[in-house]
Image: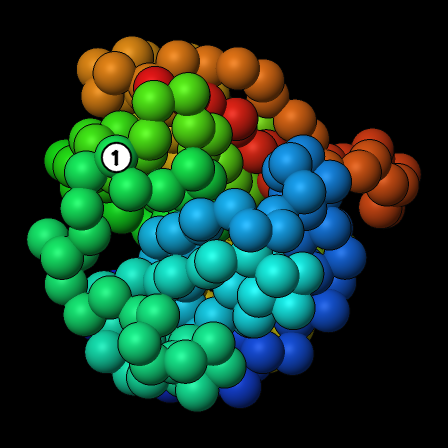
């Protein structure tokens, strides 16, 4: 089994490309929240192999990507054009994007890096623009299995920031994620100068007798 860390996500590119359940749950919900992407200038921050960016480009969005992993950036460039892929986040101009999406990134970043990401995105957004941040629903911290994951349980409570291990059913790889209560994220948004517009959960479903929502998506503005 592949164990994924921050510096080797490129090892599971094929697995990420095949995540159909995640696409139906997360990506479809995000797309329904966004304004019509046609002609919108959009940055996918932490885009991975560019799956969502490619879908937005097919809807005539002026989409660009950035990812910390060079191999991921190469793969995204193969989909949307390498000229649309930023090699360094410092190359992105302030107030240059109407929409910024940051999907499943904050939950694998340290507390310090989370705030750095939020501040970067606050600068990148045009006045009145929208940012969308999504990650696994923290309120499922004590659920050992969902349609997407097997989660290794810890002795921590919901209120405590802590790391935990999970196995992704789609792809069968192992990752370490950070659990943080929603109130912690909301405080970080305030520190970065972002205003909370809305909080959305992905569709509810029944699994092993429990009602679950796999992801939470925040809509924010400058």
Instruction: Assess disc 1: are there few (<14), some (14-19) or many (≥20) residues with their C-alpha within 10 Å of its C-alpha.
Output: some
Q: Which residue is depicted at the point 73% across and 69% down? A: 20
Instruction: Farthest residue to the front: give it.
Output: 39
Return the residue nearer the eye: 107 or 60.
60
| Residue 84 spot, x, y in % from top left | 35, 70
Quadrant of the image containing the C terminus: top left
Drawn side of residue 19 relative to residue 6, left or right: right
Query: Total number of numbered labels?
Result: 1
| Residue 187 spot, x, y in % from top left | 31, 13
Q: Which residue is depicted at the point 63% across and 38% down? A: 34
Mark 1 highlights which residue?
95
Q: Does 19 appear above or below 114?
A: below
Residue 14 visible in image: yes
| Colour convention | rainbow
Instruction: Determine the secondary structure under disc 1.
Output: loop
Drawn side of residue 91 relative to residue 165, left or right: left
Residue 142 visible in image: no
Q: Please tell me in which quadrant of the rendered image residue 137 appears.
A: top right
Drawn side of residue 23 relative to residue 115, left or right: right
Q: Please tell me in which quadrant of the rendered image residue 209 appears.
A: top right
Drawn side of residue 87 relative to residue 55, left or right: left
Q: Does 131 appear above or below 175?
A: above
Instruction: Farthest residue to the left: give it.
Output: 90
Return the residue nearer the eye: 90 or 169.
90
Q: Which residue is depicted at the point 85% across and 46% down? A: 208
| Residue 35 spot, x, y in % from top left | 64, 36
| Residue 181 spot, x, y in % from top left | 43, 22
């Amino acid at each position: 089994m592949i164990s994924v860390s921050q510096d080797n996500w490129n090892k599971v590119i094929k697995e990420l490309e095949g995540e159909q359940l995640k696409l139906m749950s997360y990506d479809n919900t995000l797309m329904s929240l966004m304004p019509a992407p046609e002609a919108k200038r959009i940055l996918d921050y932490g885009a991975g192999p560019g799956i969502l960016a490619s879908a937005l480009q097919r809807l005539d969005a002026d989409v660009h990507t950035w990812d910390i992993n060079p191999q991921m950036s190469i793969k995204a460039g193969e989909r949307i054009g390498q000229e649309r892929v930023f090699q360094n986040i410092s190359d992105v101009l302030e107030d240059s994007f109407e929409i910024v999406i940051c999907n499943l990134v904050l939950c694998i970043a340290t507390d310090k890096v989370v705030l750095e990401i939020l501040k970067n995105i606050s600068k990148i957004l045009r006045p009145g623009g929208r940012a969308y941040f999504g990650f696994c629903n923290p309120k499922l911290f004590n659920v050992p299995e969902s349609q997407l994951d097997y989660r290794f349980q810890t002795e921590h409570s919901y209120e405590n920031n802590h790391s935990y291990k999970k196995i992704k059913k789609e792809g069968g790889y192992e990752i370490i994620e950070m659990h943080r209560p929603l109130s912690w994220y909301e405080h970080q948004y305030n520190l970065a100068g972002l205003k909370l517009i809305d909080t959305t959960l992905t569709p509810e479903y029944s699994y092993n007798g429990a009602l679950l929502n796999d992801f939470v998506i925040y809509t924010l503005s400058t």
